[in-house]
């Protein structure tokens, strides 16, 4: 074989080998990324149910999800997540996905209700593109903890006019403090909660028996 031919063959082998290695690496990274995204969803669902995950590692969070949380669909084909305590046959809390426009991005999260199907048990936001230090505060504990104990539905199952108000305003059982300098993000949170609460109202009325 001529020298120039051997050089071309060697170069081709190197190119094919590198291509295969890059393809394999990309596939592996894609699978890892997908697994991480799926875990982040589970982590935020557990968090939305009012569970303190600050001291839990990944296996602990995944075990909690598998042990207590099940997923179903409403009659309108909307996803619903149910939390069942140890030894219980019926769920004690319910969660559903929430999403809507903030200032710069679409906000994604989960909101859960206590067994009365009126009172918020917790909330979490897991994906957004809001401004760090301003709208991005929606993912911070101080903002999310406010929602626990607030009312989302009336005794009759009607969605209430939930509000995210300017910091320092007089709050009631259907309102929380907003974020200083991020009024539009707060209005977005308010709007998406109202929208998704309305979407799930009939489901909760049906299982509550109203």
Image: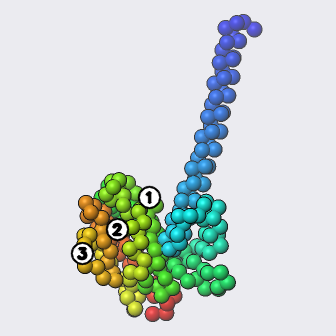
Quadrant in the rendering for residue 169 = bottom left
- Residue 6 lies, with reference to residue 84, above or below; the image says above
Residue occupied by mark 3: 169
Look at 36% across and 58% down and name the residue there. Answer: 136
Residue 181 coordinates in the image, percent (x, y): 25, 60
Coloring applied to the structure = rainbow
Disc 2 and disc 3: Cα gap in Å? 17 Å
Residue occupied by mark 2: 189
Q: Is residue 17 left or right of residue 204?
A: right
Quadrant in the rendering for residue 83 = bottom right
Disc 1 and disc 3: Cα gap in Å? 28 Å
- Residue 175 lies, with reference to residue 125, above or below; the image says below
Residue occupied by mark 1: 127
In the image, 17 versus 126, the foreground residue is 126
Q: Pick the quarter of the image with the N terminus.
A: top right
Disc 1 and disc 2: Cα gap in Å? 13 Å
Task: Look at the numbered discs 2 and 3 and tell me whether their residues touch, using CB distance below 8 Å.
Answer: no
Circle 2: element type: helix
Q: Residue furthest front?
A: 55
**Residue 185 in view:** yes
Residue 82 coordinates in the image, percent (x, y): 56, 77
């Amino acid at each position: 074989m001529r020298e120039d031919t051997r050089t071309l063959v060697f170069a081709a082998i190197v190119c094919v080998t590198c291509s295969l290695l890059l393809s394999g690496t990309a596939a592996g990274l894609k699978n890892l990324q997908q697994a991480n995204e799926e875990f982040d969803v589970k982590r935020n669902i557990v968090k939305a149910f009012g569970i303190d995950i600050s001291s839990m590692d990944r296996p602990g969070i995944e075990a909690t999800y598998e042990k207590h949380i099940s997923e179903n669909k409403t009659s309108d084909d909307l996803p619903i997540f149910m939390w069942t305590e140890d030894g219980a046959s019926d769920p004690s809390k319910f969660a559903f996905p929430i999403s809507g426009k903030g200032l710069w991005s679409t906000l994604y999260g989960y909101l859960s209700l206590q067994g009365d199907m009126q009172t918020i048990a917790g909330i979490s936001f897991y994906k957004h593109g809001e401004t760090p230090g301003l709208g991005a505060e929606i993912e911070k504990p101080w903002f999310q903890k406010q929602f626990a104990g607030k009312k989302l539905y009336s005794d009759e199952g009607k969605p209430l006019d939930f509000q995210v108000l300017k910091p320092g305003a007089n709050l009631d059982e259907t309102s929380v403090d907003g974020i200083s300098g991020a009024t539009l993000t707060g209005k977005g949170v308010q709007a998406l909660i109202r929208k998704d609460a309305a979407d799930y109202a009939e489901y909760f009325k049906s299982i509550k028996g109203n």
